[in-house]
Image (cartoon, rainbow, N blue to C red):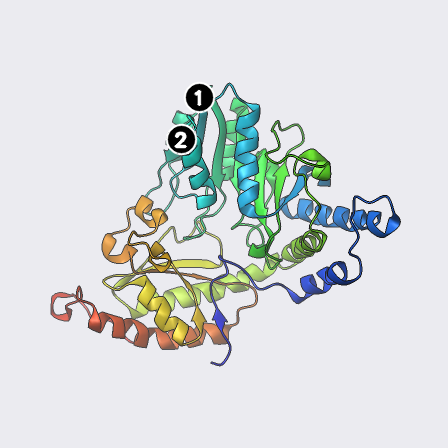
Amino acid sequence: MKKVIYLDNNATTKVDPEVLDAMLPFLRDSYGNPSSIHSFGGNIGRDIDKARQNVADLVGAENDYEIVFTGTGTESDNLALLGTVAYYKEKNHIITTRVEHPAILSLCKKLERDGYRVTYVPVDREGNLDVEMLRDTVNDDTAIVSVMYANNETGVINPVEEIGAFLKERGIQFHIDAVQGAGKMSLDVNKFHCNLLSLSAHKFHGPKGIGALYVRRGTRMRPILHGGHQEKGRRPGTENVAGIVGMGKAAELALKHLPDEKRVRMLRDKLENGILKAFKNSHLNGDKEKRVPNTTNIGFEYIEGEAILLYLDERRIAASSGSACSSGSLEPSHVLRAMGVPFTSAHGSIRFSLSRFNIEEEIDYVLSVMPEVVNKLLEISPYWDNEKQEGKPISI
């Protein structure tokens, strides 16, 4: 296989060629500032409005006014939480989950240092959220609840409709980090009853460096940046026109290609079932049913995820580890630890995340090389003793 087989789409996706075509004029010829009085710049505002409407359509927003463009999904998360607590100064309590993205967890740790109380709701062995505990934790001092739509490591989907309906009754702000849901599942902010929802273009075949925050009309919050009038004062700074247009086009295409996710799910299942059938020392991390269609997280006992990734990389296969060891940490992924995944497999967990650009030939190739990779690592593992195991790894 000469080309790289890219199975790390939860990290970033290939930019759709149609998105590139839409962006290029704004990098080459239409480079005016949309805030300018002259038409060379001012007319570009119409292109931004079109992109804003496309993003609104992607999440089911009622009007494009509710879409605020940001620099990244991380910035969107920060704007949602910091903007909310800045407005509701009399409230001192935040609720989130133990398996959120670092964009939320790191911010919550910072807010704890600033004196806020943060409740981290646990999940079970399959990554499902303890909704009853979340309900019991809500009180009159709660400023905001932040829950991700789908987990970036396991793909497990949270019951945001149920949570949103409850919080709406209580009159509490609800933020959803939907970065891993957009382009994979149908999103509807009205069904979710959310006030705020974060997106990032590079997760659905758009460019990096552009994100958005859905802000329901009437939602109270403060800006966290101060400057000009852009984005109606909610996010000042000269607009990244090419990025915004690219995100808008990617949103349009994401809606168009949502039916393709059935094929993506079939490829994901073929890869997952082939691996789980082949190796008795492997298991699925996360709920098998309640997850996005492109993601599988598989744990291999007694071998290191980093080593698997390196061997796969030599064979031109790009995946990612369910363990933070690839970044130099000796600790397993915080998500897997929260789920109670045994240490023997938490370090050997690999995430494969597909996109509509993957084909069956690529899946067949990955399945053909996995026996060599896993068996070789088991042979040199100090924790693996074939004579003491019930079964040996089976080649595909």
Residue drawn where x is 23% and y is 57% of the image: 344
> Where is residue 319 drawn, in percent x and y?
43, 65
Farthest-out residue, right: 39
Classify mark 2: helix, strand or loop. helix
Residue 256 at least partly seen: yes
Residue drawn where x is 62% and y is 32% of the image: 223
Q: Disc 2 marks which amino acid?
A: Arg
Label 1 crowd bin: few (<14), some (14–19), many (20+), radius 10 Å: few
Q: Disc 1 marks which amino acid?
A: Asn
Label 2 crowd bin: few (<14), some (14–19), many (20+), radius 10 Å: few
Q: Is residue 205 left or right of residue 324?
A: right
Farthest-out residue, front: 227
> Where is residue 18 drawn, in percent x and y?
69, 64
Numbered circle sitting on residue 113: 2
Residue under numbered circle 1: 139
Residue drawn where x is 79% and y is 43% of the image: 35
